[in-house]
Image (cartoon, rainbow, N blue to C red):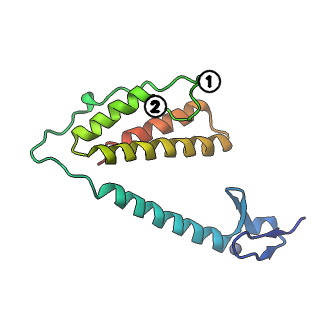
Amino acid sequence: MKERKCCDCEEIFERRKSVKKINGDWLCRACYISRRKNRRKETIKEARKLEKPIIRKPKQEPTKAKDFPKIKGSKKTKKDKNYSYITIQEKQNLLRMLMSRGMDFDDAKERIKDLVEEQKRVKECMKERGKTEKQIKVKQMEMIEELWDL
Ligand SMILES: [Zn+2]
C-alpha cells in the first residue's frame, strides 16, 4: 500500500482509509473537516452578500407560481458549451422575474450568473459520481426553483 500524504497538513498516512480524496487532493479527516467549515463560511458570506441588496417594493402582489417562466432547458448542441440548463432566452425571463420582485438589475444578473456557475459545478460533480443525465437535470431544475426563495 502506497503512503498517502495529506495535502494540507502534509502528515503521512499509511492506510488509505485515513485520507479522503477531495477535488483531487488527498486530505486527512481533520483537514477535510476544516476545509468544509471554511467552505460553509464562504457560502454563508456569499449568500449574505446576495441577500443584502434586495429591496422589496412595498405592497407588491406576490408573484404567482403560474407566472413563472417555463423552463424547457437547452438542448445539447455543439454551441452550448456552458453546461447550463437554461437558455439565453430563459435567462432573460428569469432576470425579468427577479427584477419584477424588486431586485435591481445588477443583483438579478449576479444571482443568475451564480446559478449557472453552480449548475455547472453540480453537473460535473454528479457526472463524476455516475449520476444520469436525467438526475442531473432534475437537480438543475430544483436549483432554478430555489431562485424564487428570495
Ligand atoms: Zn491533514
Q: Which-is-in-front pick, marks 1 and 2?
A: 1
Image quadrant for the N terminus? bottom right
Residue sitting farthest toward the right: 1
Ligand 1 image-quadrant field: bottom right
Q: Amino acid at mark 2?
A: Ile
Coordinates of residue 57 in the picture (x, y in percent): 15, 47
Q: Which quadrant would residue 76 be assigned to in this image?
A: top right
Residue at mark 2? 86
Query: Which residue is depicted at the point 36% across and 43% down?
Result: 109
Q: CA distance from mark 1 to mark 2?
A: 15 Å
Tag 1, which secondary structure? loop
Coordinates of residue 56 in the picture (x, y in percent): 18, 49
Coordinates of residue 87 in the picture (x, y in percent): 45, 28
Marks 1 & 2, CB-CB < 8 Å contact: no
Indicate whether 90 appears above or below 30: above
Tag 2, which secondary structure? loop
Coordinates of residue 12 in the picture (x, y in percent): 81, 75
Indicate whether 14 appears above or below 114: below
Q: Residues within 10 Å of mark 1 (few under 14, many from 20)?
A: few
Q: Is residue 14 left or right of residue 112?
A: right
Q: Is residue 66 left or right of residue 44?
A: left
Numbered tag placed on residue 78 in the rendering: 1
Q: Amino acid at mark 1?
A: Lys
Query: Which residue is depicted at the point 64% across and 40% down?
Result: 127
Query: Which residue is depicted at the point 72% across and 56% down?
Result: 24
Q: Residues within 10 Å of mark 2 (few under 14, many from 20)?
A: many
Indicate whether 80 appears above or below 61: above
Residue nearest the observer in this picture, 146 or 76? 76
Q: Which quadrant would residue 63 be assigned to in this image?
A: top left
